[in-house]
Amino acid sequence: MIDKEGLAAWLRLTLTPGIGGETQRKLLAAFGLPEAIFAAGRLAARAVVGERADQLFDFDPSEAVDRSIAWAEQPGQHILTLADSGYPQALLEIPDPPSLLYVRGDPALLQKRGLAIVGSRNATPQGQQTAETFARTLAAKGLAVISGLALGIDAAAHRGALTTGGATIAVIGTGADRIYPARNKELALAIAERGAIISEFPLGTPAIAANFPRRNRIISGLARGVLVVEAAPESGSLITARLAAEQGREVFAIPGSIHSPVARGCHKLIKQGAKLVETAQDILEELGSFADSSVVEQPVASRDESDVLKALGHDPCGLDDLVDRTGVSADRLLGELLTLELDGLIATLPGNRYQRLA
């Protein structure tokens, strides 16, 4: 049951133009709950935040407040405030938690230990497969996979978690009633049904460029660590990594070719102290045990990957020989070999050779 009066006060505070997060926190620190701010009156609020307090008492957001409450009354839709017991504990650890979170899906997932997986929107096919495989493996171990629903690496990470039936959380830069980009509509609907989509922005907020870097602090704040899969040197993913480090989270990066523009951001992070990651096990070891899975499961290969393992045998084998043994194209084999390597089942040797480890 929604406390409409209490929620209305929170919405009035956050929907008033000119009253940003810092001002909201000052007022909440001084008065406690939003209802107490409005009960105290204009002069008392002015003593805390100056003339900005006038906006709170002059502006009437009642139409938007009513619309937001009606939205939250629909099944699978929620608004969490800083005062709610269901507000994610991890966000209370960061210096600038959002006062409100609009949630589509299961809000309980916001309490799970999670890993953020981020990277380039213009990811390579290999990068997308890497993100999807890492997400699938880590979600199977009980970690929630957190990302931003963007094209490229973000979408691949969400898909990987959903594939294994794991938890995934999309932190978006629009209102929770909007889907952006439109190409990810089906993915977004699947996340809302089986995971959670969250936003700090009011309902109806369109895609505004400045909002996407701003939401990155929530992606990193919800997570125990951030994994960057592919990123250019000036990528927004590096903003997320920087925020993660400032918030005391772990930062991981997957290296790539020295000739690849989307590997340079990861290499930059590694130079700055991010942990170089080759397998999902590297992340699990760094994060330590967590509630859902203190014992690391042995990876299980799919049928196609098992066929590749059989063809490999236990001696080093080159790609051309594998093509001959399996009758599978080199492009498809490379994808399956990458998955096997990320699962810790094979190792890549010099000279484009591969060796079975399990």
Image: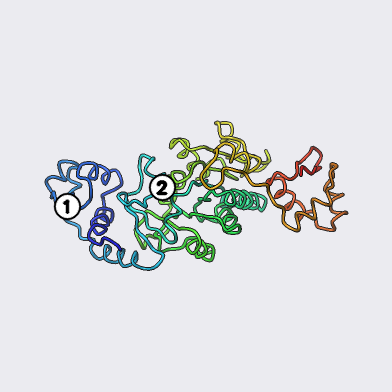
Q: Please identify, in this view, whether the residue under mark 2 or under mark 1 is nearer the observer.
A: 1
The residue located at (79%, 50%) in the rendering is 309
Lower position in the chain sequence, tag 2 or tag 1: 1
The amino acid sitting under disc 2 is Arg
Nearer the observer, 92 or 119: 92
**Residue 157 image point, x, y percent:** 57, 53
Nearer the observer, 184 or 298: 298
> Residue 38 got which mark?
1
The amino acid sitting under disc 1 is Phe
Discs 2, 1 touching: Cβ within 8 Å: no
**Residue 43 image point, x, y percent:** 11, 46
Judge from the rendering whether residue 117 lies leftward or rightward of residue 354; answer left or right: left
Give the Cα separation between the discs numbered 2 and 1: 28 Å
Instruction: State which quadrant residue 329 falls in.
Output: bottom right
Q: Residues within 10 Å of mark 2 (few under 14, many from 20)?
A: some
The quadrant in which the C terminus is found is top right
Q: Can you identify the residue that label 2 sits on? A: 214
> Residue 169 got which mark?
none
The residue located at (46%, 63%) in the rendering is 179
The residue located at (44%, 59%) in the rendering is 106
Residue 68, compared with residue 249, is above or below; it is below
Judge from the rendering whether residue 246 lies leftward or rightward of residue 317; answer left or right: left
Instruction: State which quadrant residue 271 falls in.
Output: top right
Secondary structure at badge 1 equals helix
**Residue 7 image point, x, y percent:** 27, 58
The quadrant in which the N terminus is found is bottom left
Residue 176, compared with residue 33, is above or below; it is below
